Amino acid sequence: MAPFYELIQLAIGTRASFSIPPDSTQWESLYQQATKHDLIGITYAAVVELPKQQQPDMQLLLQWSEKAKQIKVRNAHVNEQCSQLVEHFREAGFQAIILNGQNHLPNYPEHLRELRVPGNIDIWVKGKSKKQVYQFVRKEYPNEKYGYLHIHYPFFSDTSVEVHIRPAFLYNPFRNHYLQRWADSLDLNALTDPVEFRNFNNVYQPLYLYRHLKSEGITLRQLLDFYFLLKQHPSYDIPMLDKLSLILFYQDLTAVALYLFEGQSLPTVSSQKLLDEILTCGNTDSDLAFCSLQSCSNLSRLYPDESIYRPCFLLFQKVWRLFH
């Protein structure tokens, strides 16, 4: 296995040592890879535990350490912002929970929670109607444009916030209809219970990552989020995943996560192809336009149910915007 994946496994405790300790040139490459995949903090947890003779040179080690300190400070700051944001909407009479991001932290081992690189804030807000949520946001920020999924909410100057009216969507109109009915039936206050939120995430996360793979690629940080969710043993909602046509993708995603983070073998051809897609378009330096086109083409062969409806959904979105 490549040294970078071994470094991640060392950090999360699924490996005891490198197969071959990296030399100084390899350490520089590992640092760059960790930065690209937003795992600079997580991998630092492994670096500092290595025997001194196996660690990178002092200059790189200090650079890594400084990045880790910045991530810890940033995590504390974004955690506080999430609390403020949720409280703001609840005081206004809405239900609200944070999607993704900081809500993954409880699934991580305690020594890694402060080292996960925080991103933007996605918050799912529910009121008496979706229109009520839009109106509330537009009253505060009248110039913000909104779409079918979310609306930008410049509540903080240093952290981007998206207010989700819906948690996600599917191109297939029949499956999307079922998804939206399911989402509308959920009580967000009940999802403040950790077990209930993990069970919700075991459906939502594969759906979120599927959308991400087709548009921007999946980073290894996002895949690690999914891995630590699996380690919490959430309920496997087969009927729901089947209705959303996500069972094969869920199984392949699980296999890829276990391959990268535990060294298990890949059981199917489709899981190997999914791994190839993730590694090709899964970092911040990728050409997003090329990856989106490439992924749509490749994923249409792997998971055809969604792909054939994509043109229809794009047309629907344009019509929806005209009428809303």
Image: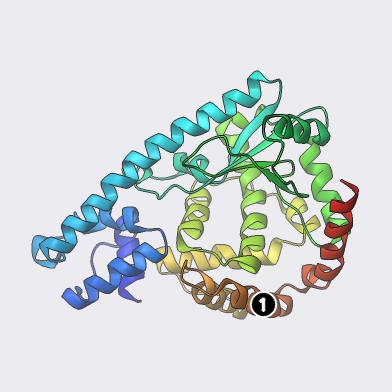
Is 102 located above or below residue 211 in the figure?
above
Identify which residue is drawn at 59% across, 79% down: 273
Please give left or right for residue 117 compared with residue 65 in the image: right
Identify which residue is drawn at 16% across, 66% down: 56
Query: Which residue occupies the foreground of this view, 105 or 169?
Result: 169
Q: Position of residue 208 (x, y in %)?
A: 64, 55
Is 198 located above or below residue 137 in the figure?
below
Q: Position of residue 139 (x, y in %)?
A: 73, 29
Mark 1, residue position: 293
The answer to whether residue 23 of the structure is visible from this angle is no
Is 264 located above or below residue 178 in the figure?
below
Amino acid at circle 1: Leu
Quick one: label 1, few (<14), some, or many (20+) residues within 10 Å? few
Instruction: Please give the count of numbered marks on the rendered protein.
Output: 1
Quadrant in which the N terminus appears? bottom left
Q: Which residue lies furthest to the left in this view?
A: 53
Query: Which residue occupies the foreground of this view, 107 or 121?
Result: 121
The image quadrant that residue 318 belongs to is bottom right
Identify which residue is drawn at 86% across, 51% down: 177
Identify which residue is drawn at 76% across, 54% down: 169
Q: What SS does tag 1 mark? A: helix
The answer to whether residue 293 of the structure is visible from this angle is yes
Is 130 located above or below residue 263 in the figure?
above
Q: Position of residue 247 (x, y in %)?
A: 70, 62
